[in-house]
Amino acid sequence: MTDISPPPASPRVRFAPSPTGSLHVGSVRTALFNWLYARHYGGAFLLRIEDTDKARSTDDSTRAIFEGMRWLGLDWDEEVVYQGLGLERHRRDAEHLLETSAAYRCFCTQAELDAMRKAAESRKESFKYDRRCDRLSAEDIAQRVAAGTPFTVRFRVPDGSTEWDDLVHGRISFPNKDIEDFVVLRSDGTPIYNMAVVSDDIFQRVTLVMRGDDHVSNTPKQILLYRALGASLPQFSHVPMILGADGKKLSKRHGATAVSDYSAQGILPQAMVNFLALLGWSPGGDREVMQLKEMTDLFSTGGLQKKAAVFDTKKLEWMNGQHLSLMSAAELAPLVTIDLLAAGLATQENLGARQDWYLALVDLLKVRARTIHDIVRQAVPYFRDDIEYDPDAVAKQWKDRPATTELLQAVRESLASLGHWSPEPMEASLRALAEQRGVTGGKLFQPLRVALTGMTVSPGIFEVLMAMGRERALMRLDRAIEMLRA
RNA sequence: GGCGCGUUCGUCUAGCGGCCCAGGACAUCGCCCUCUCAAGGCGGAGAUCGCGGGUUCGAAUCCCGCACGCGCUACCA
């Protein structure tokens, strides 16, 4: 599908999360699409923190938004706008609506409203405010205002229908009779979401509102507000939701939903971004593994999907593996270092002193890793004196303990007598040993692998020996032999 | 209930009237490589394109119904 209408000359889009929890991957994807759009068309990507719900908004959540965005590489333009600071403007805009008779005062209390709603429900009817306060006489209204009776400001929805050309869905149309006269200003003078959003989007000169599908029913209300305020309409684009494996909206029930969960799991930001972009967007054709730069070049709203997408952790992990293998050891090492230090396996000085060795090790381990954590897990035998022996590995590869003891002793001797601790002589001597005993290399390498790493899985045995170094390798063999004898 | 939106392999998707008895990727299975595990390579299985009608010489693609799913339906955002 091609774009319905071209972007304006200087497009302005925004990401407007509310700081009421951790940064959700669904929000991130919406942010990403906005960012991609702005960068592709050379526009501005604005960040607005919608902190008007004082009860639920926290500074921690705001920080999580900044951190998450920075981690992902989604930089924003201009100053961050805090919605809470726009209160006066929101109120002015609402009052303007009142002055131009686009809205009216509603003196109904919440209790009355609830009762009406309940009554309608019991009659099996859908509730819609009956506009009773719009029929109040001017004197009546003046009297109540003078008496200080609290009131909300309600928007008077006109007849007709409200429609727009959605960049994703095409034309969407709502009969106005289905939209009730909605509140724009609470009785305490604070704005309702739709009022604040429209006021802010006008203020920030937003040209395209791209947000989740769960907002389509807000859009006709917002369009009505733009018109009543005499503002020009932005374009709208509603992107599909992200679902859990059960087809329900992705939530904590499904496991990790916050970006911070994934960064903590050793997922790379570029993999996260790549994976998320492909949930609901496609550049067309078979392109899959991409960097932010390529996605920016290829981005078009025409590639946006209408249908909700299921979050597949398996594919994310695969994607991470792809990006991992694309990174050089030098690029990867700093990230691995963070986790290595956190795990107490090494110190900064220790690693710095043997940079070449460290980079070689990272190169060796990243091949069979899907996350940074996989690398760290595998790295343990090269850093610690004590290692854990996987019980299954021991049971399988050291089945015959006396024979294994004898075998490892022979291996130890053979390795210890090596003139040069280098792969060629190592392989030559160990292969010779195997031949002399009439066994295949594997029969010898596997018990050795367990002795060195405690695992059945590792890089090639000679690479392990090299990375481990003569001293540690021999020490570990000694320990293994000791264990086997015990 | 009302309103809105959606529907191509288990999952993410390509597809914009003939190139499609539907292509790629993840997952899955098998083979190759091989000292293990990965990675990589090759191959298999897997979608009557939700269903039913049209339009058309021709439809996954256009139109209309139906079904199912999801979202919204607050003085929350």
Image (tube, rainbow, N blue to C red):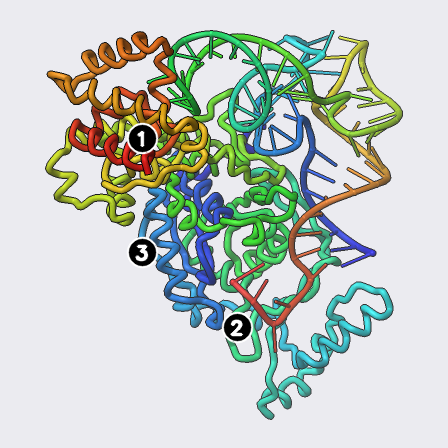
Residue B57, x across and y down, in percent: 81, 9
Discs 1, 2: same chain = yes
Chain of the residue under label 3: A
Residue type beneath disc 1: Ala
Discs 3, 1: same chain = yes
A185 shown above or below B12: below
Between B67 and B31, the residue placed more toward the observer is B31
Residue A16, x across and y down, in percent: 45, 54
Where is the N terminus of chain A found, in terms of image quarters?
top right
Chain of the residue under label 2: A
For label 3, the SS is loop
Query: What residue is rendered at 54% in x and 57% in y?
Result: A226
Query: What residue is rendered at 64% in x and 47% in y?
Result: A248
Q: Which residue is mark 1?
A: A451
Residue type beneath disc 2: Glu
Q: Which mark is residue A79?
A: 3
Between A426 and A163, the residue placed more toward the observer is A426
Q: Nearer the viewer, mark 3 or mark 2?
A: 3
Residue A96, x across and y down, in percent: 52, 69
Q: Earlier in the sequence, mark 1 or mark 2?
A: 2
Q: Which residue is mark 2?
A: A95
- Labels 3 and 2 touching (C-beta < 8 A): no
Quadrant of the rendered structure where residue A400 is?
A: top left
Q: Nearer the viewer, mark 3 or mark 1?
A: 1
Decide if residue A449 is in sight here.
Answer: yes
Query: What residue is rendered at 13% in x and 34% in y?
Result: A354
Say left or right for B61 vs A380: right
